[in-house]
Amino acid sequence: MTAIRPLGALELDIAAALHGAAFAEWGERAWSRADFAGLLAAPGTVALLHDGATPDGLALGRHAADEGEILTLAVHPLARRHGVGRALIAALLARLAAAGAAQVFLEVAADNAGAQALYRGFGFEVAGRRPAYYARAGLPPADAVLMRRVA
Ligand SMILES: CC(C)(COP(=O)(O)OP(=O)(O)OC[C@H]1O[C@@H](n2cnc3c(N)ncnc32)[C@H](O)[C@@H]1OP(=O)(O)O)[C@@H](O)C(=O)NCCC(=O)NCCS
């Protein structure tokens, strides 16, 4: 049995809690249960959950025509640096490719070196920059780096 499986419609609270725990250190707004419900209902969304002892990571993406997008990747702080993020992105990219995505895009905070290293490991390259893209509690907004991977 694989540790990665689709995020179920009854697991919205788990998803919201994981997202909040993962992004708290960045001061970014946690996605709510309603945010996840909306994304799961949208056409082309792929949502994956990783099970450790408890659910400890998630990745969301979507595809439309021949393009894919990574919407978020979140690993619980206690589960990091054990390959969970890498396994989730590998599984997500496989599903996006199977759905016909010839190229995949993502945005990541310009100062998030760890996540950028993870994505570079999958062949993503910087394709642009979006100034003041991320609102952060009590801090100035942060730039996003746009990354692209061609299948
Ligand atoms: C980024 C994140 C998803 C990584 O998850 P993870 O399960 O710890 O990642 P992995 O263990 O699979 O790491 C894979 C590789 O990515 C790189 N990497 C991951 N975290 C890193 C860090 N903090 N510093 C430097 N490199 C890092 C390394 O190359 C790592 O390989 P290695 O451990 O063999 O050196 C996790 O830290 C997280 O949830 N962060 C907060 C949310 C976030 O930044 N999401 C991504 C932006 S949308």
Image: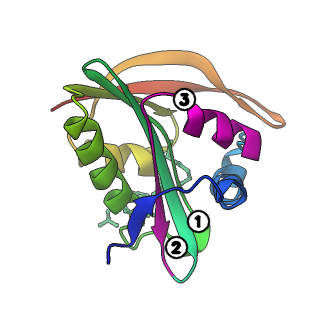
The residues bearing labels 1 and 2 have C-alpha atoms spaced at a distance of: 5 Å
Of the residues shown, which amino acid type is indicated by label 3? Answer: Ala
Can you give x and y, in whole percent of width and height, for residue 44 in the image? 42, 30
Relative side of 19 to 121, left or right: right
Q: Earlier in the sequence, mark 2 or mark 3?
A: 3
Q: Can the viewer see residue 32 in this picture? A: no
**In-front residue for pair 38/74:** 38
Residue highlighted by disc 1: 76
Relative side of 98 to 92, left or right: left
Question: Is residue 5 shown above or below 146?
Answer: below
Q: Residue furthest bottom?
A: 53
Numbered circle sitting on residue 79: 2
Of the residues shown, which amino acid type is indicated by label 2? Answer: Ala
Q: Which residue sits at x=54%, y=29%? A: 42
Residue highlighted by disc 3: 42
The quadrant in which residue 2 appears is bottom left
Residue behind label 2 places its C-beta within 8 angstroms of ligand 1: yes
- Neighbor class of circle 3 (other Cα within 10 Å; few <14, some 14-19, many 20+) is few
The answer to whether marks 1 and 2 mark residues whose Cβ atoms lie closer than 8 Å is yes
Q: Which residue sits at x=33%, y=58%? A: 86
Quadrant occupied by the C terminus: top left
Question: Is residue 66 shown above or below 36?
Answer: above
Of the residues shown, which amino acid type is indicated by label 1? Answer: His
- Please name which of the two marks, 1 or 3, marks the residue nearer to the observer: 3
Q: Which residue sits at x=61%, y=52%? A: 9
**In-front residue for pair 78/6:** 6
Can you give x and y, in whole percent of width and height, for residue 69 in the image? 39, 29
